[in-house]
Image (cartoon, coloured by chain):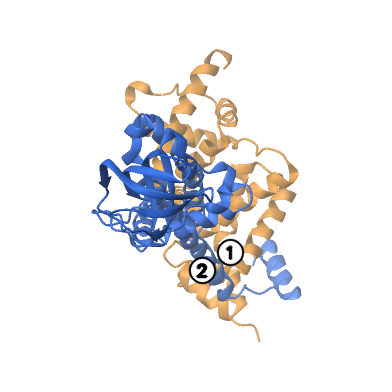
Chain colours: A blue, B orange
Amino acid sequence: MTNSSKKILDKIEKEKIAPKPKWQFRLEQVGLWSLAVVSVIIGSNAVAAIIFRMVNNDWDTLKFLQRSPIGHALTTLPYVWIVVLGLFVLLAYYNTRHTKKGYKYNTYGVVIGAVLASVIVGTVIYSVGFAPRVDRFMERVPGMEKLMHSREEIWMHPEKGFVAGEIQQILSGVGIFSIEDLEGQYWVVRPGEDYRIHPAVIIMEGEYVRIIGMPEDTETFVADQIMPWQFGFAPNGAIHFQSKPNFRRMK
Amino acid sequence: MAVIRDCNLKSDEELVELTLSDQGWYLCLMQRYEAKLTRFIRRISGVNDQDLEDILQDVFIKVYRNLNNFDLDLKFSSWIYRICRNHVISHYRKVQSRPQSIGGEDGELILHMIKDDNDPHELIDETLSNEKIQKVLSQMDKKYQEVIVLKYLEDKDYQEISDILKKPVGTIGTLLSRAKKQFKQVVQKQGTEF
């Protein structure tokens, strides 16, 4: 027995040093993996919100808005959600990397894996209609609302022919109904000569619609195009879950 | 009555299991690794004997405390080298100084090994003295220095180096290749000064 080894063994005995229990190490590993999974779940919610915002981004009205697709995309990209996705993918990578065998995994593999998992789970979250709630949750985080693009603003200009709101009442006559717009003003909407209605629109009380047309007077709006406020996940635009426009922001 | 423990027939992994139920077996592991770790610490840090003894003691106690975290998928030697290397790094962070250069005879060994790995047309001048090699190594990045120590002096394979440094095997290949390149560059750069 060397002097050094004996000293160490004596110290272990004297100070009653004992190996840490297994459960402590297991708990640490479980914690790291759990954080990685939670990060992917939050990233998935970010993906769901990105899909939701990109689908419901008024692409169908660009020619009326006189905007180029690229300019419109750059203005309306959900940057906050993209940053959230990036942060949580990095966090998932960091936690995975610090697990026991994390160093063996390829960096790009882990990052791409986290992004792919987020996209797959995020698509599922979007398809079950949870994305609008996620998006609204972020808008309620103090300070975030100002950073997020407000789609509603486009539809607050009846004088320019753009109005959106909730259908209040179906009135007599074909396609005549009343709405309360995003600023709380009531309009009677009647079809114009080139009246077109999107197949996904359901004219019934409580539905939210976007209308392109022109005001006839201070109470009547002549509609040329009526489109749903939101599109659903299905290819035909069927709506699984419709969220209210952000009235709180507008009033 | 003193317990007689026959260490020689036991593998490292068996000794870990035995130590967990009877700490006396830990002596076998310490005896097996004391000289190796002493050499390794000296190679990557160049500490004096007093510091070296303290570091070694801390390493063995840390290993003992963490025995339940030893992963049987690893070689025990890789695991204990990893703990040792990390402890040396944190020791230097505490005292805020940089590990010193690699010792004399080791320098000659490294030169010999690197030359064996290389294209014959790119051989490094055989007349480089140990002193000059030490100078070259001391000017290399720490990450390259330690990968050269592990590969050429500790005789570890890529998988073991990967487990010790906690980096993917592919990264070890890249690090080693860059380390050799940097070694040659430093030799060429310093050529006129030698």
- Residue A237 is marked as none
The quadrant of the rendering that contains the N terminus of chain A is bottom right
Q: Residues within 10 Å of mark 1 (few under 14, many from 20)?
A: some
Residue A215 position, x and y percent, is 42, 39
Query: Which residue has dot 2 on it?
Result: A30
Residue A49 position, x and y percent, is 43, 52
Q: Quadrant of residue A128?
A: bottom left
Residue at horizontal 66%, vertical 74%?
Answer: A18
Q: Quadrant of residue B65?
A: bottom right
Query: Which residue has dot 1 on it?
Result: B31
Residue type pointed to by label 1: Gln
Q: Is residue B99 visible?
A: yes
How many numbered badges does the structure rendering display? 2
Residue at horizontal 52%, vertical 23%?
Answer: B186
Residue A11 position, x and y percent, is 73, 69
Residue nearer the viewer, B116 or A249: A249
Chain that bears disc 1:
B
Q: Residue furthest top?
A: B192
Give the vertical position of A213 relative to B78 (above or below): above
Q: Residue furthest bottom?
A: B1
Q: Are marks 1 and 2 on the same chain?
A: no
Chain that bears disc 2:
A
SS for dot 2:
helix
In the picture, measured across the screen, residue A123 lies left or right of residue B60, that is left
Residue at horizontal 60%, vertical 37%?
Answer: B103
Residue type pointed to by label 2: Val
SS for dot 1:
helix
